[in-house]
Amino acid sequence: MALTHVTPDGQARMVDVGAKPIMHRQAVAGGKIFLRPDTLKLIRENGIQKGDVLAVARVAGISGGKKTAELIPLCHNIPIDRIDLDISLRSDHVEIIARASCQARTGIEMEALTAATVAALTIYDMCKAVDHEMVIGEIRLLEKTKS
């Protein structure tokens, strides 16, 4: 299988998507951050000193998704129509689901993955003073579609 981001002589390159049709594209990415039960309780009760952890993580995820092309060198800068994050508390972790959509020549999965990752990193940053055992994991693409 030929890699689209590599020239025949092995050099990294940005893929030319100019000939591809503009289509409606959607992607859903997920992630988790595992925390101690007492940290989850503080989040639930809005007791983290930095503020409302889930609200800040949601906004950070949206902002991060919008900056994907600045962070990932070979990503195209695409017109994003929507980025939404659902962030929910579970028994031993916070679950993050990021949904993104666009009308573009290339997909939006990197933006969804970046949104989920930045949301998890934000939760980590906001809780690091009270929990030194946090683990970010299971960042993954759950779905991508085009029509």
Image: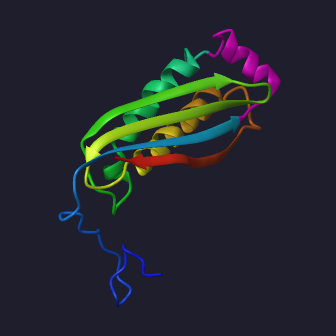
Residue 107 as seen in the image, left or right of residue 144:
left
The quadrant where residue 44 appears: top right
| Viewer-closest of 39 and 33 | 33
| Viewer-closest of 54 and 14 | 14
Q: Which residues lie in the magenta part?
A: 34-48
Residue 47 colored magenta?
Answer: yes
Residue sitting at 35 percent across and 90 percent down?
9
Residue 144 as seen in the image, left or right of residue 78:
right
Q: Position of residue 124 (x, y in %)?
A: 62, 34
Residue sitting at 34 percent across and 43 percent down?
67
Residue sitting at 54 percent across and 26 percent down?
86
Residue 24 colored magenta?
Answer: no
- Colour scheme in use: rainbow
Residue 92 to residue 18: above or below: above
Q: Position of residue 113 (x, y in %)?
A: 49, 46
Q: Position of residue 18 (x, y in %)?
A: 18, 63
Question: Residue placed farthest to the left in the image?
Answer: 18
